[in-house]
Amino acid sequence: MTNREPTILVIEDETPILHFIQTTLSGAGYRVVGAEDGKEGLAQAMAWNPDVVLLDLGLPDIDGLEVIRRLREWTSKPIIVLTARAQERDKVTALDLGADDYLTKPFGIEELLARMRVALRRTARTEAGESVFQLGELRVDLEKRQVFVAGEEIHLSPTEYKLLTVLVRHAGKVITHRQLLKEVWGPLHADDAPYLRVYMRQLRNKLEANPAQPRYLVTELGVGYRLRVD
């Protein structure tokens, strides 16, 4: 990341909402580009190569899910979905297609800003190739394959460690059950949700001060898990 202000592309067909987001983000120091349909949004994305895309799913011309699919053909920059669709299926589909996060309308602007900051930090870490991840008392040294909590080394099984490193690489991002299963156990196990629940419980027991109320490894009900960094 450079020192310039991040460019945010907002693809939203409801003009009052689009203008409100544009005004708010501009006031917060971001460069903001707006589009009111999918075709314009894709064209603006190509022209500006934004640092974050805020995408409404319910667009008048191209479904937002198709916009995600087309964006992911050429960019890995964060996509945060803004949706009035409450169904878990739509959220899971958007995330599986490559979205990084989602907010269900109506949402608070402070929450939107927080999610954007997390997405931008994650991009900066990825581009810097950082090998040590620090979050509160949790420290993961990806190069040495060591995990510490409050300075004490925690011994994880190979599968537990692999699961944790996937979450660390995508820290702050919602990762669906299917994505985690494919990355940790392989595509043949993409539907074996019990595996994931067992290992997530084991990880929480080793890393969380209170596994019943996790600080780091949080559940996104019906969708997946997130390594919470905010």
Image (cartoon, rainbow, N blue to C red):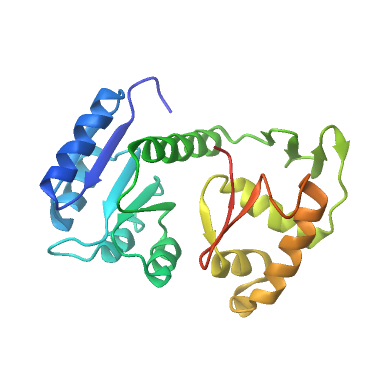
Residue appearing at x 79%, y 60% in the figure: 202
Q: Position of residue 58 (x, y in %)?
A: 22, 62
Name the quadrant of the C terminus: top right
Q: Position of residue 72 (x, y in %)?
A: 36, 57
Report which quarter residue 64 is drawn in: bottom left
Residue appearing at x 41%, y 40% in the figure: 111
Q: Is residue 34 left or right of residue 200?
A: left
Q: Position of residue 158 (x, y in %)?
A: 81, 59
Residue appearing at x 51%, y 49% in the figure: 173
Report which quarter residue 49 is drawn in: top left
Report which quarter residue 117 is drawn in: top left
Q: Is residue 15 left or right of residue 172?
A: left
Q: Nearer the viewer, residue 222 or 93?
A: 222
Q: Is residue 202 left or right of residue 166?
A: right
Residue 201 appears anywhere in the view: yes
Name the quadrant of the N terminus: top left
Q: Nearer the viewer, residue 179 or 103?
A: 103
Q: Is residue 68 left or right of residue 33?
A: right
